Amino acid sequence: MMTKAGGEKTLTGIGVAAGIAIGPAYVIEMRGLQVPEYSVPAGQTDEEVMRFQAAMEKSRRQIAKLKNKASSLPANAAEEVGILLEAHLAMLTGSRLVRGVEQSIKQDKINAEAAIQRQIGIISEGFRAMDDAYLAARVTDIQEVGSRLIRNLLEQKYNPFDNIPDGSIIITEEITPADTALMDPTHVSGFAAVLGGAEGHAAIMARALGLPAVLGVAALLQGVSTGDIVVIDGRRGEVVVRPTAATLKQARQQLAKRNREQEKLKSLRKLPAETQDGTVIGMHANLELPREIDNALAAGAQGIGLLRTEFMFMNRPDLPDEDEQYETLKKMLGKLDGRMLTVRTLDVGGEKLATALGDSIGISANPALGLRAIRLGLKQPQLLDTQLAAALRAAAHGPLRILVPMVSTVQQMLQVKEHMLQVAKKLQRRGVKLPEKLPLVGAMIEIPGAALAADALAQVSDFFAIGSNDLTQYTLAIDRGDEQVADLYNPLHPAVLRLIHFTTTAALRARIPVSLCGEMAGDQRYVPLLMGLGLRELSMAPSRIAEVKRTIRGLSLTEASGFAGMIMAKADEQEIRHLVEQGGMFTPTGWQLKKNTKQAG
């Protein structure tokens, strides 16, 4: 953290979505909750106490992460924040607050949220009555801890963004994918948070929405208030609070320059992504939300390579029924006007939580490896069948294919195909119009075991889509949303590259299409390598399409193949990263392989 005269403060974090944002801060604190109160039957109070204890454990983990993050601050600030968070932790371990809440649940027979609120009121009143300035200040700490507990009980972390002034920059502790889904880029300029990493799903959604974002910013919430002018640089990972006139002028110049570059890239919209030696690469878009489809088409997307259907299940108390899902897909197909729509079945779990599913997903010690994606769909077939029915009906209105996430076995693919067949028969009995041919069903290759078994999976799949984000996470055992290990997340690790190569080779051998729809596809530095590994179809955030297309048009496939061959012969990940990042150069027409790349290393 650096502070200048005049109050300008510069904070650094992880730049997760490029771009410059300038606007008033909108600080979201963990207060202002609507707390429900209801009676708990006498025989269920022990269960309610356990629910409260689970919320305490979650709160302790959150505070421990914040404390660890604070340790990276300058010494004085780290000590001050550390003492504060230590006090919060103490309140969650055998404290008067904890004892009081458990007693209230049992004696008053009320829900945990209401019991917490009552105890906060009692303790706060007692502190204020002592007329002691130090104790009065502790009331705020107790309220903050209580709010955290209640939010964890409610699975609700932030206020809605409805009343945020236009152009605001959101400043908060943590942003979830569900939070990001609520942001409207026409009203929100960007966001910054204390927690989070570059490869988490909230970061991916920020890139998809074109929102500049910086995560993992220690001490972000200290010294910034709603209304303060803030500048976010999503490429450099900087947050400047109360910028001086000179800083503000420089930021506006950078923003204007970026806007001019984006305007130039629009000229590529109707041009094919064709290499210098005549190979055309399919350019598709990943969509988080239906509202992005206009941006995808404006960017020149040839179709949707990945529609994440989780958006239909987030930020709502109930499940979307077949008709609602069908209408959403039908509307999108209408806009695509004959272009392919790739619908990925529900992939919740891990960091992607869907409140509509309620308690149907049990608590897992390791959610990323637990009941999620197609495992959940096959465990709760009504979820999968409803999605398949909606997709089959929509397929009568345009080209649509179905992508199955987190596949690990041949049996899973066969089960999904059988489900689709049975659903189709039911729809036919209902007299529902279906396409002449049932949609293609593809496997998402994002588990190392699936990549290693790609030959077998290719025999039961109509296409592959490589999910490089989870493939990297599972191969390297790195939580991609955890800023504490973010530096270890490396899609260029030789193990990851070999798994991608296994998959593309198996697909080419079986003569089925294969695409890559992870974040690697939207990074122009990786494009020559991916092309050299056999990828002929890439799917990415709409905002990345023009830059990647420009890169492809400056390449020759022959050179890219040679470059990939050289990379695959390497075993040292640092050397690979250096070659990929330094093996090319930026020119006035985009990123290009250096002429001496083949001799490098």
Image: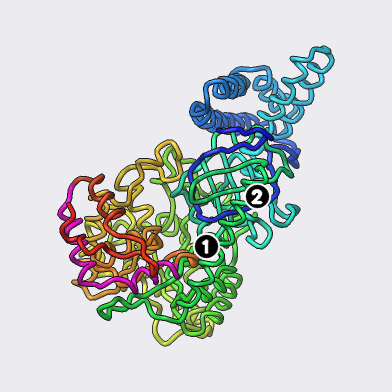
On the image, the x and y values in percent for residue 373 come to: 43, 56
On the image, the x and y values in percent for residue 476 come to: 30, 44
Q: Residue at x 40, y 38 (%)?
A: 485
Mark 1 or mark 2, earlier in chain:
2
Residue position marked by numbered label 1 in the rendering: 288
Which three-letter amino acid code belongs to the residue tagged 2? Ile
| Residue 254 can be seen in this image | yes
Q: In the visual, does 95 lie left or right of 414?
A: right
Q: Is residue 588 magenta?
A: no
Element at label 2:
strand
Residue position marked by numbered label 2 in the rendering: 169
Asked if residue 204 is positioned above or below residue 11 in the image, the reply reads below
Q: Residue at x 33, y 78 (%)?
A: 274
On the image, the x and y values in percent for residue 203 come to: 50, 51
Element at label 1:
loop
Which three-letter amino acid code belongs to the residue tagged 1? Glu
Q: In the visual, does 366 lie left or right of 254?
A: left
Alpha carbon separation for disc pair 1 and 2: 21 Å
Q: Residue at x 52, y 39 (%)?
A: 12
**Magenta part of the protein: which range?**
545-571
Using the image as rendered, state which of residue 159 and residue 371 is in the foreground. Answer: 159
Query: What is the chief secondary structure element of the magenta stretch?
Result: helix
